[in-house]
Image (cartoon, rainbow, N blue to C red):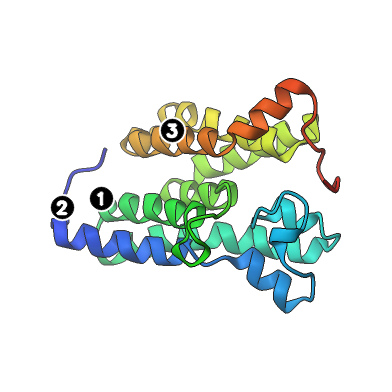
Amino acid sequence: MPILETSIAGLVVWALIGYALGSIPFGMVLARVMGLGNLREVGSGNIGATNVLRTGNKTAAFLTLVLDGAKGAVAVLLARAFAGEDAAQIAGLAAFLGHCFPVWLGFRGGKGVATFLGIILALAWPVGLACCAAWAAGAGLSRMSSMGALVAAASSTFFMVFMGHAGALLLGMVLTVLVFVRHKDNIKRIRAGTEPKIGQKT
């Protein structure tokens, strides 16, 4: 946990900025702009990159992945530049919540994996790179994006301690729990052997 340097009012402002950035539904915007239809009617109905990939458009899926990650990173970097590390962590958490629970979509957002990785990369890039590698390993071996997400989230706190970034440990633990909660249905399907593989239409 970083030292609290920013006023409560300042933290509230950065939380609002982080939430606003995180709540931008890039997957839905790109699907509309690129003529891919309404993501709510595709696959799982999720707004993230994995579901965008189910439209068959890899470019749109890649752009969604990058932009969803970028909004988390931008929230952290802006708050760090103009306020401090405490504000950066608050903004990062708010961006994650904005992605998962965007007011514009009736609080029905994505599962936050790309945004989670973007936040971690901005907070501590060595940890972020390690988490990305963990995601790639988990997803590659299982052929399930959700498994990659769970592996990356579960390993993030270990990487934070091992790489000397314990100041972000509390935030990392909170984000890990939230990622697991958002993937509760995926966990059930993984255990039942019915979780879709990467690129598979549902």
* Residue wearing tag 1: 86
Circle on res. 103? none
* Residue that appears at 75% across and 22% down: 192
Front position in the image: 87 or 166: 87
Q: Is residue 176 left or right of residue 47?
A: left
- The extreme top residue here reads 191
Q: Secondary structure at mark 3?
A: helix
Which of pointers 1 and 2 lies earlier in the amino acid sequence? 2
Q: Position of residue 132 (x, y in %)?
A: 62, 42
Q: Secondary structure at mark 1?
A: helix
Q: Check if mark 1's residue and mark 2's residue have beta carbons within 8 Å.
A: yes
Q: Nearer the viewer, mark 1 or mark 3?
A: 1
Q: Secondary structure at mark 2?
A: loop
Residue 154 visible here: yes
* Residue wearing tag 3: 160
Circle on res. 5? 2
Q: Position of residue 22 (x, y in %)?
A: 47, 61
Residue 83 visible here: no
